[in-house]
Image: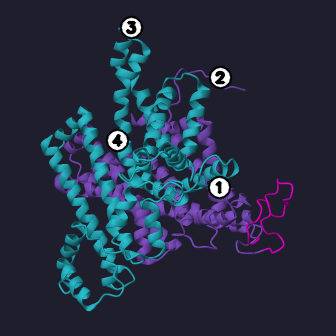
Amino acid sequence: MPRIRIYQEDHILSPTQKVWQAFSDNPFALMGLWAVCCMLTLAIFGPWIAPYSPEQQDPLALLLPPSWDASGTVEHFLGTDDLGRDIFSRLLHGAHLTFGMALGIVLASLVVGFIIGSISGMMKGLKSSILSHLLDALLSIPSLLLAILVVAVMGPGLDNVFWAVGIALTPQFVRAIHQAVHEELQKDYVTAAKLDGANSIQIFWYVIMPNVWETVIIQTTLAISAAILDIAALGFLNLGAQAPSPEWGAMVSQGLDNLLTAPWTVTIPGVAILCSVLAINLVGDGLRSALSPIRN
Amino acid sequence: MGRYLLRRLNLFLATSFVLIAVLFITTSYFPTSKVVALTGITEPTAEQLQNIETTYQLNGNQLEQFFAYAKARLSGDLGVSITSQRPVIEELTQALPASFELAIVSGLIAVLLGVPLGVFASLSKNKVTQHSIMAITLTGYSIPVFWLGLTLSLWFGVKLGWLPVSGRLNQLYEVEPVTGFMLTDTILWESVYRFSAFKDALFHIILPSITLAVLPFTVVVRITRAAMLNIMEQPYIKAAEARGLHTSTIVLRHALPNALIPVLKNMGLMLGTFASYAMIVEVIFSWPGVGSWLVSGIYQRDYTVIQGGVLGVALTIIFLSILIEVIHNAYNPLSRKELYAAN
């Protein structure tokens, strides 16, 4: 039964509630959020859900097609690869490598980028411009080149991907946060707070930061999708995760030998990467459009 | 404007300096002897060793070594490749045109298709059209490029057999390089087969360039759409409408030039990602450009190739991104105002 409204006045939503309402009005964004939640669960609990271990080889079921194919079986839901390893289990075990690691990398570079970006954004003149311009330049160096340098020094491996992708992502955070802080700093309400006698730390944390969080959130979602794609690309080029690893990009490159006879060994990990990145981009897009009325 | 250009030039020099410094520091960490990492000569004779020591100041302190390194690299001495023992600069200049050709063609595809579609998406009042365009661009933005390349080559190259999936040209044609761009070289080739060769080169570039174009295409569509939506609300567009101008005139002459400004800016920001993608695409389609050369260099631990390639590619990208910024500012008076207003 609808509540009878006696009074004219509306309940005034807090900014967070407004954002949530705008966000949840968009069905695609909500779908993306659900997918991201599922991915998170899989990244954490995947190894327990998986029916087989990622390296377990079944010599009786080599290159078995997925279960919806006529010759597939339900035991190997998404089929097997050329060593008889269950692709479904490998995907589940790889979720925390590709997806979980992307989150870790983004978190690390967010912290570093936040610190550098806010310091350089609060500074004025030459110091600020040196920091920001140099990082601008770093930003233009492709992540793959950085990865190649890192691999040349430290050799391939999943932990080196952390450095390569992290170094490539940090300048983006620095740049975004620097610009946001710098823009806010020019505005009148900051001057008002200054006239009230707030010191620069108070101005930064209590005056400017509440208006910068949106930029941080949007940049984070962008960075997560970029990180997943980068990790997978490095795995594909054999510069990141190495052969038996169930990292999704590495799975694509391992399936490459059988591309013509067993295309699902390449297609299925690729679709997994696509879906996870798509889910994050949906959330990011939804957040951006939900936040934009407040930002403008 | 002069002062601004000078500042950009300074920025370019400073960044290149930092880049060389980073390369110098990494070089000393390469798991090989310093002489090999610097020059690529695996078994130097006593005379060569003497030479290397004087060129790179190996007996001096770190700072002297750095300046000697920078001097050698900037004068075009990138050492020789460890595997092929050919000068790195030679291999680099051979590979660069192929990469540029691929990048230019896919950039053109992205802009020529992306801008009209973005304008169309912004003008369309139909919800279904809007949603489907946004869905397509979002998917294109999320697709892993290596997987897309494999899938396209599997379908169009192998299953349907329409297009070649590797290389730039059929081995049948011995086209002598003039510009290094296969599409122009085949046209300039003096032979009766030049048009069939051109057709062949064109067929070879279709799949890689489309794969590479997907990311910039989606970005261009989204940015154009957002910019157009924003601009169509502006008072000057309303004024143009009130004057009774035709919609096409308003869109093409009044709105589009302004909508292209953010597109240009984002292209500059996207260069790094674009270059990463280009390298992956080159590897997948065996395109003989810098990307596949560099990746094979890392597989063979060819340290001089890695240094030379990273230096060449990064310098090109830094230069292009600064160039795009300069063009952006020259084209957009508003950002110039900001430039002078800020200290």
Q: Position of residue B45 (x, y in %)?
A: 29, 90
Earlier along the polypeptide chain: callout 3 or callout 4? 3
Q: Disc 1 marks which amino acid? A: Ala
Q: Which mark is residue A4?
A: 2
Q: Report how many numbered discs are placed on residues in the image.
A: 4
Q: Badges 2 and 3: C-beta atoms under 8 Å apart?
A: no
Q: Disc 2 marks which amino acid? A: Ile
Q: Position of residue B119 (x, y in %)?
A: 46, 28
Look at the magenta stretch and give its main secondary structure: loop
Chain letter for mark 4, please.
Answer: B
Classify residue A254 by image quadrant. bottom right
Magenta stretch, residue numbers = A58-84
Q: Position of residue A220 (x, y in %)?
A: 46, 52
Same chain, labels 1 and 3: no
Chain letter for mark 2, please.
Answer: A
Q: Which residue is mark 3?
A: B244
Q: Is residue A74 magenta?
A: yes
Q: Residue at x 43, y 66 (%)?
A: B294
Q: Disc 4 marks which amino acid? A: Lys
Q: Which mark is residue B265?
A: 4
Measure the C-alpha gap from mark 2 to mark 3: 50 Å
Q: Secondary structure at mark 1?
A: helix
Instruction: Please give the letter of the chain rendered in cyan.
Output: B
Circle 4: is it few (<14), some (14-19), or many (20+) Cα within 10 Å? Answer: some
Measure the C-alpha gap from mark 1 to mark 3: 52 Å
Q: Hue of chain A? A: purple
